[in-house]
Amino acid sequence: MTALSGSLPVQRRQTACFSVIATAEPGTMPRVLEIFAKRGLIPDRWLSAVAGPRDGEIHIDIQLADTDRELAKRLAHSLRQVVSVQSVLTSEKRVLKSA
């Protein structure tokens, strides 16, 4: 927790965001979800859509709240190792909450 000048302490809440593009195959989503499940993590948001040329890709956007950078880095590395995953982009968003 940190304090802004002259205000109440605030808690920084960081959400890791992953954008995964993979080949549209029946086993793709379970393999991607397994990366989180085997660590006991449940994504806060999961949005997927078939897209790309001839609907041959699946685009998956995942958000995981309260995740530090090192864990996000390890998760992204593991996602890149999944069969059929073509790319993984990461970002983070932070929300300041009053304590």
Image (cartoon, rainbow, N blue to C red):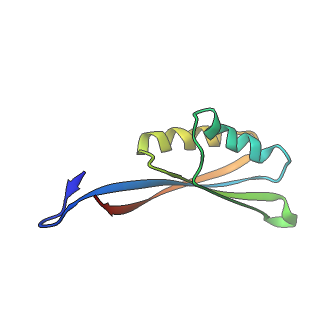
Q: Is residue 14 left or right of residue 89?
A: left
Q: In which quarter of the image is the C terminus?
A: bottom left
Q: Position of residue 49 (x, y in %)?
A: 76, 63
Q: Which of 89 and 68 is in front in this view?
A: 68
Residue 5 position by quadrant: bottom left
Q: Which residue lies furthest to the top in this view?
A: 38
Asked whether residue 84 appears in the rendered view, the answer is no
Residue furthest to the front in view is 99
Looking at this view, is 30 or 55 the one in front?
30
Q: Position of residue 94 (x, y in %)?
A: 39, 60
Query: Residue 96: x and y, percent?
Result: 33, 62
What residue lies at 41% left-to-right and 44% top-to-bottom? Answer: 68
The image position of residue 35, as x and y in percent, is: 64, 38
Question: What residue is shown at x 44% (from left), y 49% (from top)?
Answer: 66
Q: Is residue 49 above or below residue 67?
A: below
> Which residue is pictured at 58% across the width and 35% down the height?
40
Q: Going 49% across and 44% down the picture, which residue do you hit?
A: 72
Residue 11 in view (yes/no):
yes
When the figure is inspected, residue 93 is found, relative to residue 65, above or below; the finding is: below
Q: Quadrant of residue 51?
A: bottom right
Front one among 33 and 1: 1
**98 relative to 89 in the view: left or right:** left
